[in-house]
Image: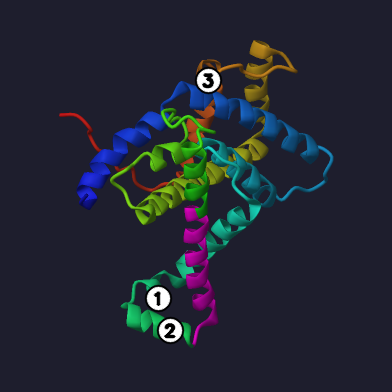
Amino acid sequence: LTPKEENIKMRPVYASVVQKNTQLEEGRKFSFSEYRKLFTTWKKKENVDVAKELGPEVYRVLGLVMGTEIPIDMYRLHVSLVEDVNKYLLYAMLPLSVSNFVTLFHSGYGKFRSNIELWHQKLEGLLVEHQKKLDSADIDKDDESHALTMLCNLKDFSLRKKEIILGGLLNAGYDTTFASLQWIMFQLAKHQDLQTKLRNEIVIKYGKDETPKTVKDLNSMEYLNAFISESMRMRATVPVNQRVNLQE
């Protein structure tokens, strides 16, 4: 397949995954449970490093969307690559012979390249392990509500291409969600009057000990959705939005 053909084939398949209500409900239930535990521990602390403690939890939720539990060392590797990419991106764009020469004198860049290869090995491991479960019927191959199943079922794509797509899904899913949550928490802490108003909306509708039961319930909370949208408008995690019309 040409890159254009791959793109045309991939977009509707991916869209079907992120739009499945079963997947959204599963993610909502898991997120509420895990974040409630996390926030309960925060109450007992005088200071909290939000970035350090929130990141792994976001990755756990992302693993649910993928259809597997992602090892913590893979999360740490991902974060390391994100932190280093701006340092070494220009080196990586050089001709291969020049790039190889740079590694002889720049240990940091050499480690960065090694980590990229390690990242691909870990992505391949997730795909291969998931394929084994599909082949042994441990997982229903016709249920494409998880990204790994969807990718394994793409017969026209090489394993390396699937690795790249999976890496893109992890990178896009983690960075955007993590950054958005950090800014939302910042805005809540800075504007505590709005935090109180938001909490009141939840308490009035569900009580102090209850939470929205479904995605539909979440979408019905006007002030919550307005707050999230405004926070994302003020601090957009993605500077551009590339949308493609899938139908004429």
Please identify the dominant SS of the magenta region.
Answer: helix
Name of the residue lying farthest toward the front: 136
Q: CA gap, disc 3 to disc 2? A: 50 Å
Residue 111 is one of the magenta-drawn residues:
yes
Quarter holding the C terminus is top left
Cα distance between the residues tagged 1 and 2: 8 Å
How far apart, in angstroms, are the residues tagged by discs 1 and 3?
44 Å
Asked if one can make out residue 95 in the rendered structure from this viewpoint, the answer is yes
Tell me the residue at 46%/41% (across/down).
Answer: 148
Q: Is residue 3 magenta?
A: no
Q: Position of residue 230 (x, y in %)?
A: 48, 33
| 96 vs 231, nearest the viewer | 96
Task: Write down the region rendered in magenta.
Answer: 105-124
> What residue type is disc 2 on?
Val
First in sequence, mark 1 or 3: give its number: 1
Q: Nearer the viewer, residue 171 or 90?
A: 171
Residue designated by label 1: 91
Q: Amino acid at mark 1?
A: Tyr
Q: Is residue 83 above or below residue 1?
A: below
Rendering coords of residue 222 (x, y %): 52, 19
Disc nearer the start of the sequence (3/2): 2
Q: Is residue 163 left or right of residue 111?
A: left
User: Which residue corresponds to the image point at 56% horizontal and 45% vertical from the top-left?
Assistant: 178
Residue at x 41%, y 28% (from the top left corner): 142
Residue sitting at x 34%, y 46% = 240
Residues under numbered marks 1 and 2 in contact, where contact means CB atoms less than 8 Å apart: yes
Q: Name the residue tied to disc 2.
A: 102
Q: Which residue is mark 3?
A: 215
Q: Please state which of residues 115 and 194 is positioned toward the viewer in this rendering.
A: 115
